[in-house]
Amino acid sequence: QVQLVESGGGLVQAGGSLRLSCEASGRIFSINTMGWYRQAPGKQRELVADITSSGGTNYGDSLKGRFTISRDNAKNTVALQMNSLKPEDTAIYYCNAEGRTSMLSNYNSYWGQGTQVTVSS
């Protein structure tokens, strides 16, 4: 199994910045895409950003420019730098990884427990 542990959430004023980090551990053979999703109360979970093992990135609508995703393949970590935060960015942010535990296994999607980000106006 692969475990994901997030850190870095909290309360910040509008216009401020936060950096989220996520580390994957456990029985890891390889990880393909790592990313961040978020879910606000009453809304569906949505993609914030993801990044492939080769560094290709994908951002949710209107987030590129304020948010930057990065990754350290050697450490199995992914980070999300969030700048110019807005109250509408308030949500639980979840780390996600597509990984496999052996060369013969399929890739599975793993999720962290989530970290709360609250942006006050």
Image: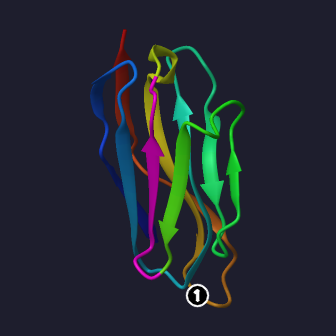
Q: Quadrant of the C terminus?
A: top left
Q: Is residue 8 above or below residue 89?
A: below
From the viewer's side, name the closer residue of 37 and 113: 37
Of all residues, the one furthest to the bottom in this rendering is: 103
Q: Is residue 103 above or below residue 46?
A: below
Q: Is residue 90 left or right of residue 56?
A: left
According to the picture, the residue beneath numbered tag 1 turns out to be 102
The amino acid at mark 1 is Ser
Please tell me whether mark 1 sits on a helix, a strand or a loop: loop
Q: Position of residue 80 (x, y in %)?
A: 46, 49
Q: Is residue 81 magenta?
A: yes
How many neighbours does mark 1 have within 10 angstroms: few (below 14), some (14-19), or many (20 or more)? few
Q: Position of residue 72 (x, y in %)?
A: 46, 73
Q: Is residue 16 magenta?
A: no
Q: Look at the image and give the residue range highlighted in magenta.
A: 74-85
Query: Residue placed at 35% from the left, 23% from the top?
Result: 118
